[in-house]
Every structure is written in structure tokens, then in C-alpha cells.
Image (cartoon, grey):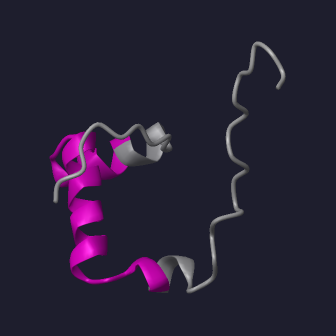
Amino acid sequence: MAIKNIVIPLEVEYLQKAAKERGISRSKLVRFVMEKVVNDDLVPTILGNDDLSNVEPPPQKYRRFRV
């Protein structure tokens, strides 16, 4: 399954420098890095096996009228 159109805030300066050293675009660099993470099953190595569901609070939902 392909995931498309996700906005991820990243450090632009670092990505620009790393991509320039390799002669590719930032987008292609990010795609290669994500493919490497998925293909090599690196998520537990990078993030650990902890539950990450509470790392970021859920966004506040707008309610015009309180129920």
C-alpha cells in the first residue's frame, strides 16, 4: 500500500545539505530514507517498543455549540 500526500515538518537545512551532498532532491532523499526504514524494519530500533499513543495530544476539535 502506498501512502501519499502526508505533510511532515522536517529540518529543511539539514535535508538540503544531505541531499546536495548526494546530488538528489530533498523529496527523493526523504523517500529513500523512509524506504530504508520500512525495508529494514528500523522503527523499533529508532523509536523503541514503547507505546507512542500519548506522545502528542490529540488536536482540539472545534465545537460551535457545546452539547
The furthest residue to the top: 64
Q: Is residue 54 above or below residue 58?
A: below
**Is residue 32 covered in magenta?**
yes
Q: Position of residue 58 (x, y in %)?
A: 68, 46
Is residue 23 found left or right of 17 in the rendered image?
Answer: left
Q: Exactly how many numbered labels are in the figure?
A: 0
Q: Position of residue 45 (x, y in %)?
A: 47, 86
The stretch of residues the image draws in magenta is 16-44
Vertical side of 36 occupied by 2: above or below: above
Name the residue: 20% across, 40% down.
Answer: 25
Q: Looking at the image, which residue is at 50% across and 43% down?
A: 11
Task: Classify residue 7 by image quadrant.
Answer: top left
Residue sitting at the far right: 66
| Residue located at (37% from left, 81% from top) | 42
Main secondary structure along the magenta-highlighted residues: helix
- The quarter of the picture where the C terminus appears is top right
Q: Nearer the viewer, residue 4 or 9?
A: 4
Please state the horizontal and vertical placement of residue 61, each as a whole percent of the image: 69, 30
In depth, the one of 28 and 43 nearer the eye is: 43
Residue shown at 45% from the left, 42% from the top: 8
Q: In this rendering, would 22 be left or right of 30?
A: left
